[in-house]
Image (cartoon, rainbow, N blue to C red):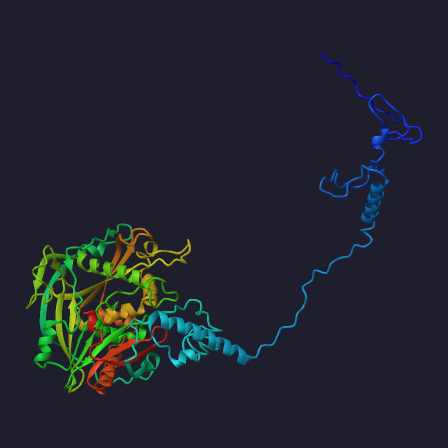
Amino acid sequence: MVAFEIPFVASNPDSWGPPPFDEDNPQQDAFGSFAKFAALPYAPFGRSDRLGRAADFTSSTRGPTGGGRQRREFRRQTEEEENAEDSFQLVDTTKAQTTKKFVNPASKRRQHTMRLRQINARRQQSTGTQPTMDKMRGRGTGGRGGRGGGRGGRGGRFGGNFGNRADRQPSVAVQSDWKQVEEIDLVKLTKNLVFSGDIPVPEDMLWCGFLDTYNEAYDKVTSRQPVPLKRMEHKEFYYVTTTDDPVLEKLAVDGMGQVFITDAVLAHLMTCTRSVYPWDIVIEKLPGGTLFFDKRDNSQFDYLTVSETAYSPPDNPARLGLEATMVNQNFSQQILKKAGRENMTLPNPFYDDDEDGMEPASVAYRYRKFALDDKTALICRTELHGKVKKTQYMTAFALNEYFPPTTGPNTANWRDKIDSQRGAVLATELKNNSFKLAKWTAQSLLSGADQMKIGFISRSSAKNDFEHVILATQFYRPKDFATQITLSENQMWSIFRTFVNLLQKQEDGKYVMMREPNKAILYLYKVPSETFQDED
């Protein structure tokens, strides 16, 4: 075994550190010389001094290990580091004050106009519509003084609704061969409306279809014991337009009236001043002055809207509208029972016996005649959905709860408020769905319903749009409910008379009345007779 030998350790009894090195007479030991330590720097220090780095291995200024040249270079670098504190200066970190550059207001307007032209150009490419000069000059959407626009505009510089305004697209693309014949401002129409004539007294012409009886068990539904909403897959619902209705066609041939329309289109026009989303209606004026108010096939007219008049409308109204329409159909049939069914004079004119396993929904089509004036009679097809207490007629509609994406965790839902604060829930719906509720009320008034049943429907879970539950139901008298939502029957009929008088002054042919998507303006276009025939 190799023995361990203690290396030589030089002692220095006079001071701390290695003993001094004598270059003339170097001391030798058994293991080496002190000469290898001669080039290492040493600086005395005090215990009260603050210590920095014990060893800096990243520094490039290490001590020299060679001859005198390297020691002189090291000494020079050491002196530069010691004198660095003398040349240290504080850096001014305060923010430099710059003068704001003045921009000519005319230059701002030119830049804004260029941005509007770019936006309108992209919109024209996507929809095929021609932008109007008002938009390009800034007087329309986003312009100076316009809705959601610049200085002084509604929701602009001093408004707070610019960020929530949606840039909607028109319901139908305006073609180059369409001729604009009239422009109607809905705001001015309401303010300058002249109430001409009284509320017309209806006269029943025909009854078709059948009505089931209301199931009174649904009056006891509460949020604590909700009832699942069933799918009425065996029921057939019909949304037949005016020109496809064989009964209206026969009444027109017999000369029973000068204006023919359905209750959905009529109620839509009567309450159109509350609408926000774009829509369009097709009107045909026949020789002799007969008017047919129609809707386009494959349009979104029959789909219900959700939170249309809310401060922040939903981003996907089409999908929510499909859900609301399905919920409304299922609810109107689930609350009825077949016991006590009443068959009308004529069967359902739209039901086909070849539809295996399907039956028409409980609807009674009530064809009514209204005298607009001494020379103009209106024939309207109205709808009733059920009977109450064997003597009263009713309509049924459903409000579905909408969960906006910005809903906070502390926002109360219908399950917490529908039983104790139903009035507050209805008040919120009147604000968010003013147009839809006004249209339902107008349809109930036109059909002569004694009661209007409204159901409050919610999703089983917030993210499941296929399963719903009934939280509550409520009966309202249409006339009282119209007063509650400030809907005047006289105003309704005056608005429609204004449209009829406007169309009676036009030439015979086909017309399209459409709402501007981002402004409360109606446009009346004269279109070729073959327009929309390819959609049939």
User: In the current view of this chain or complex, which residue is farthest to the right?
Assistant: 24
User: In the current view of this chain or complex, which residue is farthest to the top?
Assistant: 1
Nearer to me, 346 or 63: 63
Q: Position of residue 90 (x, y in %)?
A: 76, 57
Q: Is residue 169 visible?
A: no
Nearer to me, 394 or 287: 287
Nearer to me, 435 or 430: 435
State the residue at coordinates (32%, 84%): 192
Q: Position of residue 88 (x, y in %)?
A: 79, 54
Please state if 186 lies on the left or on the right of 239 as rendered: right
Residue 75's place in the image compared with 502, above or below, is: above
State the residue at coordinates (38%, 71%): 123
Please state if 171 lies on the left or on the right of 351 as rendered: right
Q: Is residue 401 visible?
A: yes
Q: Position of residue 142 (x, y in %)?
A: 43, 74
Q: Split into 4 quadrants, where in the image is the C terminus? A: bottom left
Give the quadrant of residue 94: bottom right
Residue 465's place in the image compared with 261, above or below, is: above
Residue 88's place in the image compared with 374, above or below, is: above
Q: Position of residue 465 (x, y in %)?
A: 29, 54
Nearer to me, 65 or 9: 65
Give the quadrant of residue 438: bottom left
The image shows a total of numbered marks equal to: 0
Q: Split into 4 quadrants, where in the image is the N terminus? A: top right
Give the quadrant of residue 327: bottom left
